[in-house]
Image: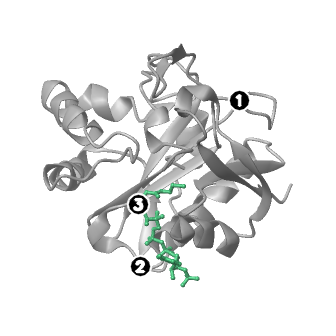
């Protein structure tokens, strides 16, 4: 998912309706898992999130500058930044694809992977009433772990913790995409029951001859 190409964690969240978000409600009981939990972005976690950005980490693996942009937003209005992490009604700004084209935002939200400090981000986006996604949206779920905490099972646990929330939305499955060479992400998906669907060429907006793998995880209904 950032979407190393696909599902970039950056595609979600610039909404304003934090308090009424059904996604936020279902995340209220953050589940503990192997020393990590998914937390709804909140003021108490923000200093650690900001510190990770200041170390040069970008939550968007496609855009290394995204971290600095987020730091500016946090500095300008931390409350608005936090509220924007929950956008289940797609009220945020449209999405700009790598070729500069602009597409509508889907409903979505982010959760922060927390082990006592910020460890990463997992994001979800969906199309209401459908498991299908527009062609330019390469997956429902995206995740990234800060480089200094990789290899500890954090992404595997984060995806496992997120899936029950997706089921509440009524989706029968989620799709994820990985770059062909992103073996770590492929391990994360397979450890969560994901199966390979196809190898495909990403839409032209992502560049010419840009191949990826599409994965599917079936959800218990
Ligand atoms: C992909 C990513 C999220 C994995 O996070 P993580 O917390 O280190 O993942 P986990 O520790 O839960 O699991 C990683 C798995 O990949 C395996 N792995 C890691 N590097 C590998 C490599 N180079 N080759 C093969 N397997 C590898 C690990 O052994 C582990 O598998 P296992 O549990 O079967 O042993 C992290 O590397 C990352 O943030 N990358 C940049 C962003 C990104 O690529 N996001 C996903 C886009 S699709």
Tags 1 and 3 touching, CB below 8 Å: no
Q: Residues within 10 Å of mark 2 (few under 14, many from 20)?
A: few
Distance from Cα at disc 1 to Cα at disc 3: 28 Å
Q: Nearer the viewer, mark 1 or mark 3?
A: 1
Compared to 29, does 135 lie above or below?
above
**Residue at image mark 2:** 151
**Residue at image mark 3:** 113
Q: Residues within 10 Å of mark 1 (few under 14, many from 20)?
A: few
The location of residue 75, given as percent across then percent down, is 13, 31
Mark toward the start of the polypeptide (2 vs 3): 3
Q: How crowded is mark 3: few (under 14 residues within 10 Å), some or many (20 or more)?
A: many
- The answer to whether mark 2 is within 8 Å of ligand 1 is yes
Mark toward the start of the polypeptide (1 vs 3): 3
Identify the residue at image location x=44%, y=23%. Answer: 15
Q: Is mark 3 on a helix, strand or loop?
A: strand
The location of residue 100, given as percent across then percent down, is 44, 18
Tag of residue 135:
1
Using the rendered image of the protein, determine whether residue 42 is visible from the camera's viewpoint: yes
93 vs 162, left or right, is left
Q: Which of 47 and 146 is in front in this view?
A: 146
Q: Which residue lies furthest to the front in this view?
A: 209
Q: Nearer the viewer, mark 2 or mark 1?
A: 1
């Amino acid at each position: 998912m950032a979407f190393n190409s696909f599902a970039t964690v950056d595609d979600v969240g610039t909404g304003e309706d934090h308090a009424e978000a059904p996604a936020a409600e279902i995340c209220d009981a953050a589940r503990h898992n192997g020393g990590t939990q998914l937390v709804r972005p909140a003021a108490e976690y923000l200093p650690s999130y900001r510190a990770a950005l200041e170390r040069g980490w970008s939550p968007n693996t496609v855009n290394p500058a995204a971290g600095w942009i987020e730091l500016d937003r946090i500095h300008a209005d931390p409350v608005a930044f936090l509220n924007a992490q929950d956008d289940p009604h797609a009220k945020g700004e449209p999405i700009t694809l790598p070729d500069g084209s602009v597409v509508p935002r889907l409903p979505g939200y982010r959760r922060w992977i927390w082990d006592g400090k910020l460890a990463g981000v997992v994001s979800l986006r969906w199309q209401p009433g459908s498991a299908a996604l527009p062609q330019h949206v390469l997956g429902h779920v995206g995740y990234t772990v800060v480089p200094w905490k990789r290899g500890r099972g954090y992404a595997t646990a984060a995806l496992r913790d997120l899936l029950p929330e997706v089921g509440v939305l009524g989706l029968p499955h989620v799709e994820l995409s990985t770059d062909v060479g992103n073996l770590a992400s492929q391990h994360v998906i397979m450890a969560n029951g994901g199966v390979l669907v196809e190898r495909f060429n990403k839409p032209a907006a992502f560049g010419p001859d840009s191949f990826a793998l599409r994965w599917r995880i079936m959800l218990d209904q």
